[in-house]
Amino acid sequence: MQSIYPDKLGIDFNNFYLNELLSKELLSVHHVNSGPEPNSGIKSIRLTEAGLHFFEFKRERLINFLMRSVATPIIVSALTTGLIWLIRWLI
């Protein structure tokens, strides 16, 4: 995965949108150590797997939500109604 240096894009690490993407783990920060201290030096950003395939993951979450919240109650309702009709027909 290719690294992007925010300084070359004119983006500061205090940028709100950059911090939002980092907090949602869609981007990751990588340090190129050029000093004696850890995490000192040039910072670059990379897309994570979640950031690279954001819309695919979002579509999958939507389908899972619809199956749990819409399809399951419809199926249970249809089965319950069918069972009630069967009981009435037998009586």
Image (tube, rainbow, N blue to C red):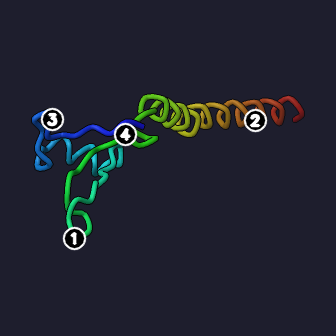
Separation (CA) of disc 3 from disc 2: 69 Å
In the picture of the structure, the residue carrying the numbered disc 3 is 8
Kindly identify the residue that appears in the image at 67 percent across and 32 percent down: 75
Kind of residue at disc 1: Glu
Kind of residue at disc 2: Ile
SS class, disc 4: strand
Residue toward you, 45 or 21: 45
Please tell me which of labels 1 and 3 falls first in the chain. 3
Please tell me which of labels 2 and 4 falls first in the chain. 4
The N terminus sits in image quarter: top left
Question: Viewer-nearest of labels 1 and 4?
Answer: 1
SS class, disc 1: loop
Separation (CA) of disc 1 from disc 4: 25 Å
Residue toward you, 60 or 15: 15
In the picture of the structure, the residue carrying the numbered disc 4 is 47
Separation (CA) of disc 1 from disc 3: 23 Å
Kind of residue at disc 4: Leu
In the picture of the structure, the residue carrying the numbered disc 2 is 84
Please tell me which of labels 3 and 2 falls first in the chain. 3
Kind of residue at disc 3: Lys
Marks 2 & 1, CB-CB < 8 Å contact: no
The label on residue 37 is 1
Q: Position of residue 79 (x, y in %)?
A: 73, 34
How many neighbours does mark 1 have within 10 angstroms: few (below 14), some (14-19), or many (20 or more)? few
